[in-house]
Image: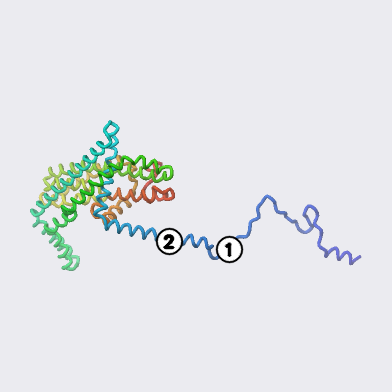
């Protein structure tokens, strides 16, 4: 009997139907809950992840390399690229005029020819004004050669007081010679042959682009079913460039005329020249104001001293504040949508790539790059707020 009792104690007890035994409770798993598998701890990423990271790095390097080659290529053909792009901008700006003429019953060929003639007449008038202004500058500068040399000597003395090398100082001051200044400005504007070549390219390209512009609606109609983002990006580019260029041109003319009249009243020599310079520099954001105001300050000091300098600063500051800081943003609105940093860097970048005209065309060129790389790709839209393109809801 004792043996049977011992065997009963040591034997494995039989669990009742409810799953309870006298020393423990067994918890049955709920069949509705998924049992989590143990997490696999991997010391190294899978082969697929490694290849994806390598592909992303290779794509970034390939993109940077392609951008570098493209920039150097554009710089190599700047004498051809700049006139063609300028003709494209002029065609975009003049396109609504052709549509208006056609809506009033003008034949398409006559409307296109009228627009081409009007645009080229304005361009020729601007070039003529530029030539007259340069001639005035070349005649004006020798009259103040001695004063320019005095300024150069004053600058040399100030630099010598800082301990700089005398040879470097003399080399820098020697560039303030009136003859060299005229040569430098002439080199910036280009020779007569270069300007003639550029005008021929602009006129020819303008004619061909104006003729091809009649088929733009058909081209967009063919592209839109398969590439709607590209069509929308190109349309936004045309609207933004047109608003910016037309507004900047109109306000630049007003700014140049106001500066011209003010300088005439102040007796500053070369008032027409500096008014034209103010008009040209109105297309150069952030930097143009300082370029436009420097020559009037110098020549104003020559004829009127510090009182004239202060008057020029006040006049230019008020006109620039009203035109470029108050009126222009209201007209252009969100058409450009570039941050101040991107705008400033783009002016420097395009000036280095294609010369001084790159500073004037910096905004349209940057908008074209944004159109190609960001606006035409839905996957790249997240870049827009980074470069300043906030939506209307976020726009303050």
Task: Give residue 72's position: percent from left, percent from top.
Answer: 30, 59
Q: Quadrant of the C terminus?
A: top left
- Can you identify the residue that label 1 sits on? 41
Q: Which residue sits at x=36%, y=40%?
A: 218
Position of the N terminus by quadrant = bottom right
**Could you tell whether 217 is left or right of 38 in the image?**
left
Q: In the image, which disc is placed on residue 1? A: none
Residue 161 vs 281, above or below: the answer is: below
SS category of the residue bearing label 2: helix
Count of picture labels: 2
Residue located beneath label 2 in the image: 58
Counting residues from the start of the chain, the first of labels 2 and 1 encountered is: 1
Select label 2 or label 1 by which is in front.
2
For the point 30% across and 58% down, the residue is 73
Return the residue found at the far right. Answer: 1
Q: Residue at x 19, y 42 (%)?
A: 121
Instruction: Give the residue drawn at x 36%, y 45%.
Output: 234
Q: Is 390 placed above or below 50 here?
A: above
Q: Nearer the viewer, residue 281 or 312?
A: 281
Between marks 2 and 1, how big is the CA–CA gap?
29 Å
Left/right placement of residue 23 relative to residue 59 reads right
| Location of residue 43 in the rendering, given as x and y in whole percent from the top left corner | 55, 65
- The answer to whether 215 is drawn above or below residue 2 in the figure is above
Kindly tell me whether residue 329 is visible in this rendering: no
């Amino acid at each position: 009997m004792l043996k049977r009792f011992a065997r009963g104690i040591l034997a494995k007890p039989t669990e009742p139907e409810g799953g309870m035994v006298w020393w423990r409770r067994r918890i049955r798993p709920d069949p509705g809950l998924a049992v989590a598998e143990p997490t696999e701890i991997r010391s190294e990423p899978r082969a697929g992840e490694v290849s994806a990271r390598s592909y992303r790095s290779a794509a970034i390097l390939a993109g940077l390399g392609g951008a570098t080659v493209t920039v150097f290529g554009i710089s190599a053909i700047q004498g051809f690229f700049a006139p063609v792009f300028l003709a494209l901008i002029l065609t975009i700006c003049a396109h609504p005029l052709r549509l208006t003429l056609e809506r009033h019953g003008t034949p398409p060929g006559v409307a296109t020819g009228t627009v081409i003639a009007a645009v080229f007449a304005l361009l020729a008038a601007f070039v003529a004004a530029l030539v007259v202004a340069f001639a005035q500058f070349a005649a004006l500068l020798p009259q103040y050669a001695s004063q320019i040399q005095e300024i150069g000597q004053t600058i040399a003395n100030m630099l010598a007081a800082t301990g700089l090398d005398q040879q470097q100082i003399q080399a820098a001051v020697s560039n303030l010679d009136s003859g060299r200044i005229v040569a430098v400005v002439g080199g910036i504007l280009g020779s007569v042959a270069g300007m003639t070549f550029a005008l021929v390219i602009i006129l020819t390209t303008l004619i061909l682009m104006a003729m091809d512009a009649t088929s733009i609606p058909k081209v967009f109609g063919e592209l839109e079913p398969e590439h709607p983002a590209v069509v929308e990006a190109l349309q936004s580019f045309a609207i933004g460039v047109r608003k910016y260029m037309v507004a900047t041109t109109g306000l630049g003319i007003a700014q140049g005329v106001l500066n011209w009249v003010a300088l005439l009243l102040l007796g500053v020599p070369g008032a027409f020249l500096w008014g034209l310079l103010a008009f040209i520099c109105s297309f150069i954001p952030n930097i143009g104001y300082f370029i436009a105001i420097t020559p009037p300050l110098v020549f104003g000091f020559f004829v009127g001293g510090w009182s004239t300098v202060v008057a020029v600063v006040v006049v230019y500051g008020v006109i620039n504040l009203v035109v470029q800081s108050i009126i222009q943003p209201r007209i252009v609105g969100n058409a450009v949508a570039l941050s101040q940093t991107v705008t400033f860097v783009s002016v420097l970048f395009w000036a280095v790539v294609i010369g001084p005209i790159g500073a004037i065309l910096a905004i349209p060129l940057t908008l074209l790059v944004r159109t190609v790389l960001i606006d035409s790709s839905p996957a790249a839209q997240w870049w827009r707020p980074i470069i300043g393109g906030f939506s209307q809801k976020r726009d303050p």
